[in-house]
Amino acid sequence: MAAEPAAPHRERSLEQPREPKPTRTLDRVVIRFAGDSGDGMQLTGDRFTSQTASLGNDLSTLPNFPAEIRAPAGTLPGVSSFQVHFADHDILTPGDTPDVLVAMNPAALRANTGDLPRGADVILDTDAFTPRNLAKAGYDGSPLDDGSLAAFTVHPVPLTTLTVGALAGFELSRKEAERAKNMFALGLLSWLFHRPTDGTERFLRTKFARRPEIAEANVAAFRAGWNFGETTEDFAVSYEVAPAQRAFAPGIYRNISGNLALAHGLVAASVRSGLPLFLGSYPITPASDILHELSRHKSFGVRTFQAEDEIAAIGAALGASFGGSLAVTTTSGPGVALKSETIGLAVSLELPLVIVDIQRGGPSTGLPTKTEQADLLQAMYGRNGEAPVPVVAPATPGECFTAALDAARIALTYRTPVFLLSDGYLANGSEPWRIPEVDELPDLRVEFATTPNHGDEFWPYLRDPVTLARPWAVPGTPGLEHRVGGIEKQDGTGDISYDPANHDLMVRTRQAKTDGVLVPDLTVDDPDGTADTLVIGWGSTYGPITAAVRRVRAGGGRIAQAHLRHLNPFPANLGGVLSRYRSVLVPEMNLGQLTRLLRARWLVDARALTQVDGMPFKAE
């Protein structure tokens, strides 16, 4: 589908008609926008992604932020990038290597050249290749002149000069005009790949509604980039990627990131349970977006509390749970460590609580803007005493929505804290997501205790014989007054107890409750049932693993795949699945944490394939 030509072409109405440039059809493309952290690469990539989603392509994105708060401009630590992979068929990853690199300065080029395959297109802002910027990036001379880019198709474009020239009629300083060069680049790429333009123009006018002159300047820069692609001789052809019509089931779709999907899943869980949603949170990368999003939904009865620290945040959430709310706390790995005592208290109190951990590189402060899967053992065992907690892990950005509902289901049904383990890759990445119908969502309604349950008395630890959940009595309910606290409780009565036999019973009962959580059996993808090797993963490794398995099968190899959403308890059939295969491979973005759990539980010779460089696996 060609982009709407009217607005960008208005400027050429007096020119002689041009011969249209040829269009080449592709089935998939990977584009990476890279520049200084102040160059607007995340906004540029996000807008290109939105345009692509509106055309109906399947897509997957990988934003890559610098960890420094503000690295010196033009240096390698300050490089920010956004990669988008789009196709006319079902895809699973942001792509191993970019087909097109847009580099806004020498540092962006140097930081990304190693990922480029031979023949890749490289679009450079030649205005940025000054001796000073080259030196900042570590170049002895200009790569434009020394032949080091001979393996690529290089398109030198004076982006800054062209942008400033296009905005000459606006009352802007040169610095303000230069800041629109990312929109010029977006316009050029939008022409090159036949992306629509009207959505971006509407977005810019909305974003800068309070400064209409800035809005119109950005629109002008965007159109100038489009027209440059149309008129320059450097781009002989444009490209078209058809919609991925066979990749999607019927429905209404939107582009969604993992954090946004997770936030919407929590709101849906609140509505389906009939409980008010309370979020106690302290800002931490990469989880803060959930706090920001949920704060916008007061109309759904959502209450967000930005606490003074991580401990206060989970304390408030646990108090809200005691008061009858669907309680959530969001954080990343360092925050989980601070919350651990209160998580143990929630285990002892047996109250529902969803703990969202958006994992990042560690230990300690580690790599705040990079991804990792290294909190699994912390979620499983990172508390004093025997304090079992169910663990759920989504596999894709869109699945963060259903994982939030699932975590809420378990928490409410079994009266227990539940870990939801996402990570930076899922949180910031995006994909097309089908908006579900309300009647497709699970019924999460709960019944509070309203009457005495043991003669004329209320026993807070008198359990449901099936789920082992204790009754949930909202404070203030007449006749149901009871005490809770961190000291061990007497089974049934809830009185403080130091009796050894009772403590043994309570510990084993809490473990049995977690072990008894109903989770679906593990599904194995083994087309003809003759594979010797099983590749099993969890969380965000799903995309790279599935893409890799497809490549092996396309080459004639026989290989099976399974992916775990539930990590505590494991699916009941997992041991039988593992025993059927001679070799078990476990790719993880840690040093083999799931591998250790599988080997210890089932004595299977599982082999780890590990990566801890802050980046997701590539399929290759």
Image (cartoon, helix red, strand yellow):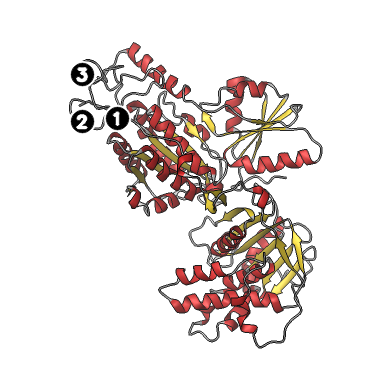
Would you say the residues marked 2 and 1 are in contact, meaning their CB atoms lie under 8 Å apart?
A: yes
Task: For the C terminus, give its image quadrant.
Answer: top right
- Direction from residue 155 to residue 218 in the image, left or right: left
Q: Which mark is residue 457?
A: 3
Disc 1 versus disc 3: distance between alpha carbons?
16 Å
Q: Which residue is mark 2?
A: 477
The quarter of the picture where residue 394 lies is: top right
What crowding class fits label 3: few (fewer than 14 Cα within 10 Å), some (14-19), or many (20 or more)? few
> x and y percent of residue 353 in the render?
38, 35
The quarter of the picture where residue 476 lies is: top left
What crowding class fits label 2: few (fewer than 14 Cα within 10 Å), some (14-19), or many (20 or more)? few
Q: What's under tag 3, amino acid-wise? A: Glu
Q: What's under tag 2, amino acid-wise? A: Thr
Q: Nearer the viewer, residue 83 or 150?
A: 83
Q: Which residue is mark 1?
A: 448
Disc 2 versus disc 1: distance between alpha carbons?
10 Å
